[in-house]
Amino acid sequence: MVVLSQPALDQFSLIKTYKPTNLSTEIPVIDLADPDAKTLMVKACEEIGLFKLVNHGVSLESMMNLETQALNFFNLPQSDKDKAGPADPFGYGDKRIGPNGDIGWVEYLLLNTNPQVTSQKSLAVFRGSPQKFRSAVEDYVLAVKRMAFQVVELMADGLGIEPRNVLSKLLRDEKSDSCFRLNYYPPCPELQALSGRNLVGFGEHTDPQIISVLRSNNTTGLQICTRDGTWVSVPPDQTSFFINVGDALQVMTNGRFRSVKHRVMADKMKSRISMIYFGGPPLSEKIAPLPSLLAEGEGSLYKEFTWCEYKISAYKSRLADYRLGLFESN
Ligand code: GA4
């Protein structure tokens, strides 16, 4: 076990926000059973890069069960949690995000969802912890994956792509490089003294994968950056999912869908917990615009690359970097 000293509060990003932005009406809400869902999804992915999904078929019980188990884990003594860390990238992480010096007011568990490539660290997380935690993760991930496959099939349908499984087959692939993250943002009472400042829990970034499916408890914190550069708070809803476009999907749609920049703020009183499934393609997959989406004479906005190349590059970057920049065609 490696013991790392903790960064002091003044090393974290404290952001001054002048007026609270709470434009809840701007977050599209899509009912999975709505016959117009595919059209609404395409519109939301083009305009914002994020939407809220309701009537999704995943039981609240499985969400709450995982939330309880995860809280049990994060409430363990630090020395017990450290046995599952440091995150490399998988495992337990505390304040340090990624390998290049990013820090945030967050503790997390990063796990691989694919048994073919499950790292020893992912398994070690559950060593010594009750079997209940492991089954809660497995049940939840199974249910969320099923729903995510449906969502990307609807997106493909909405885009008029054939076959409609072009995207879902990448996530369903046994070699799909997908992962699962549990984030725990402890309250920070010291914030009280720093009036008007907000503490960054997870700094601004885009997700590298195809899509991300997030569920959180009822604590605020998630914010997205709109096209005009304004940060907008996403009101939490513990019964729903927030789905966002990742970099790979932006490329596959040749920039039509927007990989939305987002961040999370910590709260002075309330803890926030979120669970996110990141659906990615197999490492060997070429990431390029889907040919049927290119109009006649339209060239790709990006150089061709494999998901493996993109990941290697992502892990050399800082959280807030514009990672797709290196892959844009001249
Ligand atoms: C952001 C999205 C996912 O949480 C993640 C993150 C990953 C990590 O925490 O290990 C990265 C980050 C994320 C993008 C840039 C690199 C890699 C930390 C970091 C600084 C698991 C992912 O796939 O990319």
Image (cartoon, helix red, strand yellow):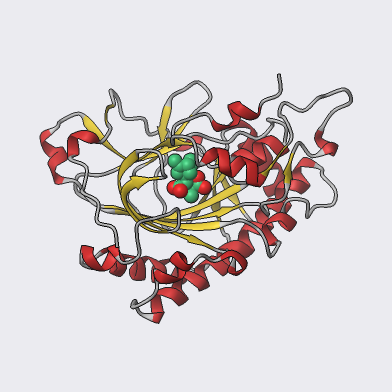
Residue 304 appears in the figure: yes
**In which image quadrant can residue 235 be found?**
top left
Answer above or below: position of 209 versus 63. Answer: above
Image vertical order of residue 264 relative to residue 302, above or below: below
- Seen from this angle, which residue lies furthest right? 296
104 up-or-down from 33: above or below: above
Quadrant in the picture for residue 300: top right
Q: Nearer the viewer, residue 3 or 327?
A: 3
Residue nearer the viewer, 161 or 130: 130
Residue 199 % position (x, y):
26, 37
Residue at 34% x, 43% y: name it. 221
- Judge left or right: residue 110 versus residue 157: left
Q: Name the outermost residue toward the top.
A: 330
Residue drawn 47% across the image and 68% down it: 120
Tag count:
0
Provide residue 164's location: percent of width, then percent of height: 80, 52
Q: Is residue 40 visible?
A: no
Residue nearest the observer in this picture, 235 or 243: 243
Residue 309 lies, in percent from the top left, at 64, 42
Residue at the far left in the pictured view: 193
- Residue 90 coordinates in the image, percent (x, y): 45, 58
Q: Is residue 256 left or right of residue 131?
A: right
For the C terminus, the image quarter is top right
Looking at the image, residue 304 sits to the left or right of residue 245; the answer is right
Q: Quadrant of the N terminus?
A: bottom left
**Which residue appears at 60% of the width and 48% of the height?**
211
Q: Is residue 171 left or right of residue 73?
A: right
- Comparing 126 with 58, the one in front is 126
